[in-house]
Image (spheres, rainbow, N blue to C red):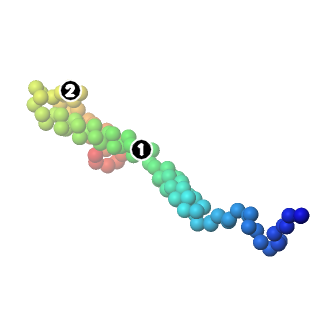
Amino acid sequence: MKPTSPPEGSNTAAAPKKSPIVAWLIGLPVVIFAVLMLIGKLMDDPQREQRWVDSETIKICWKQISKPEAERKTQEFHSQEDCDQLELAFKQKYNENP
């Protein structure tokens, strides 16, 4: 007895085709995320972080100077002149008020 082979038109043993929707559901979010990261990197201002740090330093200075000397935890800033100098340097460096 010879085994019979299935007719050429039927592929009963062939693997089912995967839907392209699965690839789109995985690939599209990855591509969108990559594009957003690239846009964020290109729009990043290298001075932005330093400007923020300088601005916060001035705020901390004024906050510390406003407290009585006995309540100050640190003695980084001693007088109002220190805060004024920080503000002047900020204005000269960034051409804007802190």
In percent of the image, x 22 and y 35: which residue is there? 61
Which residue is at a point 82% across and 72% down the rendered structure image? Answer: 7
Task: Give the image location of residue 75, x and y in percent.
Answer: 20, 25
Mark 1 residue element: loop
Q: Which mark is residue 47?
A: 1
In this rendering, is residue 79 above or below 15?
Answer: above
Instruction: Please identify the quarter of the rendering in which residue 54 is found.
Output: top left
Determine the CA span between mark 1 and mark 2.
28 Å
Please, which residue is most extreme toward the right here?
1
| Residue type for callout 1 | Gln
Which corner quadrant of the image does residue 64 belong to?
A: top left
Image mark for residue 34? none
Taking the spot 58% from the left edge, 66% from the top edge, the residue there is 21
Q: For this rendering, which residue is in front, 48 or 24? A: 24
Kind of residue at disc 2: Thr
Helix, strand or loop at mark 2 = loop
Q: Which mark is residue 74?
A: 2
Visible in this render: residue 92?
no
Is residue 79 visible in the rendered image? The answer is yes
| Sequence-first tag of 1 and 2 | 1
